[in-house]
Image (tube, grey):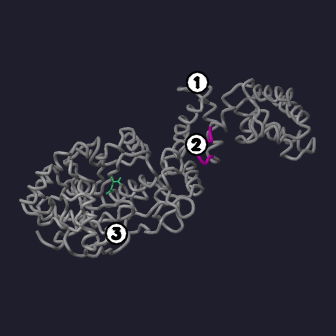
Amino acid sequence: MSSAITAPFTDATGADVKVRFCPSPTGLPHVGLIRTALFNWAYARHTGGSFLFRIEDTDAERDSEESFEMILDALNWLGLNWDEGVNVGGPAEPYRQSERTHIYQEVIEKLKASGHIYESYLTGEELDERNRANGRAVQLGYDNSERELTEEAKAAYRAEGRSPALRLRVPDVDITFTDLVRGEITFPAGSFPDFVVVRPNGQPLYTLVNPVDDALMGVTHVLRGEDLLSSTPRQIALYNALYEAGITKFIPQFGHLPYVMGEGTKKLSKRDPEANLFHHRDRGFIPEGLLNYLALLGWGLSADQDIFTMDELAAAFDVTNVNPNPARFDQKKADAINAAHIRLLGADEFKARLMPYLQSAGVVGATLSEAEQRVLDAAAPLIQERLVVLSEAPDLVSFMFKTADQIVVEEDAKAGLPENTVEVLNAGVAALEAIAESDFKTEVIQAALQAALIDGLGLKPRVAFGPLRTGISGRRISPPLFESMEILGKAETIARLNAFARVA
Ligand code: GLU
């Protein structure tokens, strides 16, 4: 056992790169967490290396199966596929820490035998007392005083019924590493004392199991949130012990990804609705849009291209280009990016993405009738250009799937109507009546209404078309009016306008 860091950092590149995503399953998936998964995925795809997915569920009090399922759901929905790990398998099974207790036990025995971890019996109060008696600040914590405890002293503690915690013997040297995002970082010798890696009850802590698993699984690059930066020197010290005990051959490279900020100077907190990945899915973000936006939280493709695909991300992504400064979650920007990706979808794909939103809003049932399919085929292109999120679609198109008697006029639509609404409706109906059934097409409808209402009655477009729009849809805002009338057909359009004229 040496008093220096003797283990080498890996220089793995290309296909030898192995990154990992190893969340603790607590609560809802946070967008910052998924950004971490995305950057690991992108780095693996960029290098041609592999992406491993492990679950760190050793905290029975906080971890839940529900949260685990949500993380799986999030990764699957986004298409962030992994090459090794949970549900996929691989050479280092199992990939859930709760199933790896026997493995940690073996490592602990080896590190005890090699002298890298040692028994520590002092309680918190005893430590404080010792520090006070020795004129040492209590905040400094542990004083490494049990490094050379004799067998007799240990036996005496045990005779008192005490069980020891296990601490790592930290080399008394500066710990320096080159962070892939932040450059060289040094923690001077003595920055932290020998720390507990196994509780007196035998339970190993995160500071042990996280690097042990990375070592046993051959992880070469640890890309994770900035909040974990302070634990990195401890992990390097532990890695060094694993190296000296013959358990691993290298220390991974580390890169700490920037915080995701909310409003003002605060981190995006779990309580902020936009922190929850599924909030965006419920609103109707599509995976392409959300991934593109998450990638912009600390990275960019180029100064003049904000919109990109996952293939473009994978081709260009290098963790060394990640910006260390905190990244702000900007909902407006995220929305604009999503709208751009919605416009990029092929016509059939767009319809397929809309369906779940139309179904859950009750606009259509589990399957479409032929008539409904025709309406959807015609309506989808009218709204694809205008949607920011897919959840806006049901309100926009539901009137097309209803019958005249089901149309309810919304309050804000009523408020915007002109005084002469009934006159406008009657003139509109007369103009539409004159069109032959087989000619009831957008251009013909537009020409007829234009001639009757704008040229004939001398109305402004807003006054002329507002009542017609509300008459057919019940709403103030709808997809383009003449196209909508064509979709409804002549009889249905006229029936709706007449029905509205009776109550307007
Ligand atoms: N389970 C840890 C967490 O969710 C992961 C730490 C790491 O990426 O090394 O915070």
Q: Which residue is mark 2?
A: 390
Q: Can you see residue 394?
A: yes
Instruction: Please name which of the two marks, 2 or 3, marks the residue nearer to the observer.
Output: 3
Q: Which residue is mark 1?
A: 369
Q: Which residue is mark 3?
A: 180
Whole-angstrom CA distance, mark 2 to mark 3, is 38 Å
**Is 206 above or below relative to 237?**
above
Depth check, front residue: 111 or 65: 111
**Mark 3 crowd level (few <14, some 14–19, many ≥20, 10 Å Cα):** many
Depth check, front residue: 369 or 265: 265
Residue 323 % position (x, y): 44, 68
Which image quarter holds the C terminus? Answer: top right
Residue 170 % position (x, y): 20, 68
Name which of mark 3 and mark 1 comes first in the sequence.
3
Q: Quadrant of residue 428?
A: top right
Give the residue at the far right of this rendering: 457
Q: Are marks 3 and 1 in contact (CB under 8 Å)?
A: no
Whole-angstrom CA distance, mark 1 to mark 2, is 22 Å
Asked whether residue 67 is drawn in magenta, I would say no
